[in-house]
Image: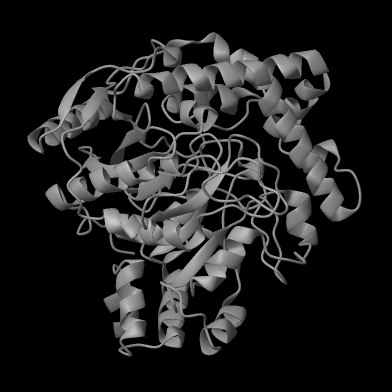
Amino acid sequence: MTSLSEDTRWLDATAQAELVAGGEVSATELTEAAIERIEQLDGPINAVIMRWFDHAREVAASDLPDGPFRGVPFLLKDLWAPYAGQPMSNGNVALRDALPISPADSTIVSRFRAAGLVTLGRTNSPELGSLPVTEPVAYGPTRNPWNIEHTPGGSSGGAAAAVSAGMVPIAHASDGGGSIRIPASCCGLIGLKPSQGRITLGPQRAESGLSVELCVSRSVRDTARLLDAVRGPGVGDTVIAPVPDRPYVHELGVEPGRLKIGLLDVDPRGVELHPDCVVAVRSAAALLESLGHDVSHGYPAPMSDRSFTSRFMSIWGASMAIGIGAYGEALGRDLTEDEVEVVNWAQARFADQVSSVDYAKGLAATAEYRRVIQQWWHDGWDLLLSPTLSEPPVRIGEHAPLPDDPMAGMKRATRFVSFTPPFNVSGQPAINVPLHRNEAGLPIGIQLVAAYGREDVLIRVASQLEAAQPWAHLTPPAG
């Protein structure tokens, strides 16, 4: 690598923006450095599946907006994030081959541009974002920079792998069941899932009640600054999170006070939790206690409800069917069975058998679950501390379908992902904090969950943990 590419590889986005603002480097120089890193590092990792390098050079050389990340290299996830004039495949084979061009930005993409970010391309994502690993048929698996035999998680796996490997300092990510927090845990990054309604999904996407968007990053300050830059409703939004009292960057380094934190160090459904994850969460509990917090065992009772998954599948299957329909609209024709991955086709066909009454019951169950789970915070708890995942990053291929069971990958996912989906349903903010590595050197994240609308609390505590046990110096094996 050239000197600038190496010198800026492990700088966070805030530090890179400061270089541009101070006139020490230009946006073009940062862009060229990131392009060089992608070209040199991405081969075995397979994180960046669309490369818009000439476009990025033009943007970097233009009169960039004077936003908080002016000139910083950035990557967009290849899922439901249209960027005007560029293609998007959503991890689907048919869309990969056709590469339809997006006519307009989504609102959050426009806000990324206004923040001054320079988008270099798109990162790999599983088709429809339906699995917690990133192994789409369309592009092949993305691999974890810490060990390429293991997954970087999903569905924002390409984004997390690119940031973790030092290709870019920050990247777009989205989360409908854990897809920001899961790859952040697997790759040793900060991953904040904002409250439902904190950031608009408009104008193309409907408010699902599950999905949110933001980023994966190396530092709490990067995440706080980007949240400030992109938060807020869009035209027609009906779910709108309360406006924060002040910018989120003002929460960095603020003493959070003595918080009442519930510790969840078992899988509430009775599934065995990997010992590495137990060690990680108990170590985090001890660190939080040493910082003056009151940590004791406790968690919302609905997390133990095994029946909720079956009631919820009517909604999840419908979302798969709607997604496949949207792919067809982009192509101007219906997709055929051989153009959709078997796990997603099976879920969509399941949705065909669901009655309107069953779907309505699923919505009612979701509303009940949301109210009951949020009651735990209303009753006096400030945060929930849990592992982010039930086990360390799994090996590539463990979520593949079987010849006689197209849903094998989804079933495997239920053992890998226990702690993230409840808070997509409840709409609460949750953050992965990269505090632990196991003996094999793989990152093991912990999750903190706050009451609805209280991202400020998460940023204060994550910032406190970052100061007490820094992780910026921890980088994967040199590429």
Count of marks, rendered view:
0
426 or 323, nearer to the observer: 426
User: Dividing the image into 4 quarters, which one contains the C terminus?
Assistant: bottom left
445 or 18, nearer to the observer: 18
> x, y (%) of residue 210?
58, 35
Residue at the farthest right position: 333
Is residue 29 depicted above or below 250 in this figure?
A: below
In the visual, does 125 lie left or right of 361? left
Could you tell me if residue 119 is visible in this image? no
Residue at the farthest front position: 245
> x, y (%) of residue 339?
79, 43
Is residue 167 depicted above or below 463 in this figure?
A: below
In the visual, does 124 lie left or right of 150? right
User: Dividing the image into 4 quarters, which one contains the N terminus?
Assistant: bottom left
User: Could you tell me which residue is drawn at 45 percent across and 75 percent down?
Assistant: 67
In the visual, does 262 lie left or right of 258? right
Q: How is the image coloured?
A: one colour
User: Could you tell me which residue is drawn at 52 percent across and 22 percent down?
Assistant: 370
Is residue 156 depicted above or below 258 in this figure?
A: below
The image quarter containing residue 98 is: bottom right
Could you tell me if residue 107 is visible in this image? yes
User: Could you tell me which residue is drawn at 56 percent across and 16 percent down?
Assistant: 368
> x, y (%) of residue 452?
44, 34
308 or 273, nearer to the observer: 308
